[in-house]
Amino acid sequence: MDRPPAQRVEVIIPARTILLMLVVVGLVALALLSLGTLISIFLAAVLALGLDPIVTALVARGWGRARAALVVFTLMFVALFVIVVLATGPAWDQIREFVQKLPEYWDELTETPVFQDLVSTADADEKVRNALAELAQGLPEAASTLLGIAGGVFGTVLSLVTLTFLSLFLLMERPAITNWLFGFVAPDTERRWRPVLDGSIIAVSQSLLGNIAISVVAATVAGLSAWLFGLPFPFVLAVIAGLLDLIPQVGATIASIILVAVALTVSTEAAIGMLIIQLIYQQLENYVVYPIVYRHAVELTGFTTIVAVLIAGALLGVVGAILAVPFAAVIKTVLREATAPRRERMAALRQVPEG
């Protein structure tokens, strides 16, 4: 019995498909090679979107878009310059004195009954004391080293200037860019997705500005508490608490641990009082301050926020952790609209028919 001849199967890939695959591969390779530039563009876009509602409000009052953007950026940099000028001198003096006294504070901390049993084993207290002493002795050398890397600092300044102007131009041209992009889609698609874009911009703006406002409140509470309990360097502790509070969920807890540890060098009563104040404030921040500042623009659960912070922090470090909440809010806004038709169909199928 003769066997039928084997059939030959041909797979024909159109030239257009091959070209599209090559373009995708090229874009991925370009993105990997210019990752730093893409991150800078992303940061500039986030900053521009964060300030966009303020500029839009000024435009609604009759201001020109370019004039409003320049005024907002000028006021922001004047405020930052004033803060830096007023805070740099006292902060550096207190930080230097604080670091130099770290071995003394460690001795006081290890003498407390709570920590004495924990750190006295395996010569842990001696090792930490020596490390702190070396840190204090190396502070002048560290300052000299910082002065010797002026070229790196200059490059960083240039990068910040580039980021600033990129953000400014994006802020000026945001409506034009939006209209140009929506010019490629059908009118029905534009009517559906333009409100989503506007909502995403508001979410980014309120997330960033709200996060800064909450950090200022946290720094004020920490500084006043440190001053009332007689803690050393209350200004430095306030700055540390404010900067750490910029990191959602995790930063406030780390700041509280630092404040309580420093309070232990003063007295057990001060540490207990600081712990109580921080616990109360964190509850107020989570359930009162956050809803007031964010209102209903950013609707993220605690689990979603922590996951977003962990992923963004692993990719971009501290900056990613700070930007995680607005980025997650944008993703949730887009996904909610994209999945709305299917969710409506599923809801209709779950309805029990009448009769």
Image (spheres, grey):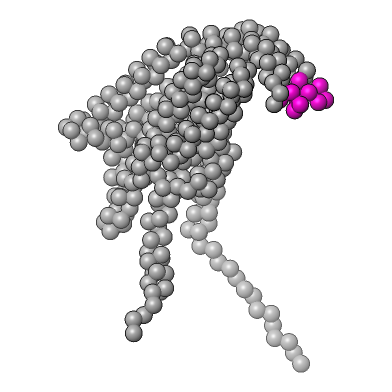
In the displayed image of the protein, which residue is found farthest to the front? 269
The residue located at (38%, 56%) in the rendering is 337
Q: Who is closer to the viewer here, 240 or 151?
A: 240
Specify the farthest residue to the left.
Answer: 62
What residue do we see at 43% from left, 15% from top? 84
> Does the magenta portion include 120?
yes
Q: Nearer the viewer, residue 48 or 125?
A: 125
Residue 182 falls within the magenta-colored stretch? no
Residues in magenta, as a range: 115-125
Task: Pick whichever, 222 or 155, lies toward us.
Answer: 222
Residue 181 horizontal/vertical position (percent): 33, 47
Residue found at x 64% / y 11%: 101
Quadrant position of residue 170: top left
Quarter assignment of residue 258: top right
Q: Position of residue 13 (x, y in %)?
A: 54, 63
Q: State the image quarter where residue 56 is shown.
A: top left
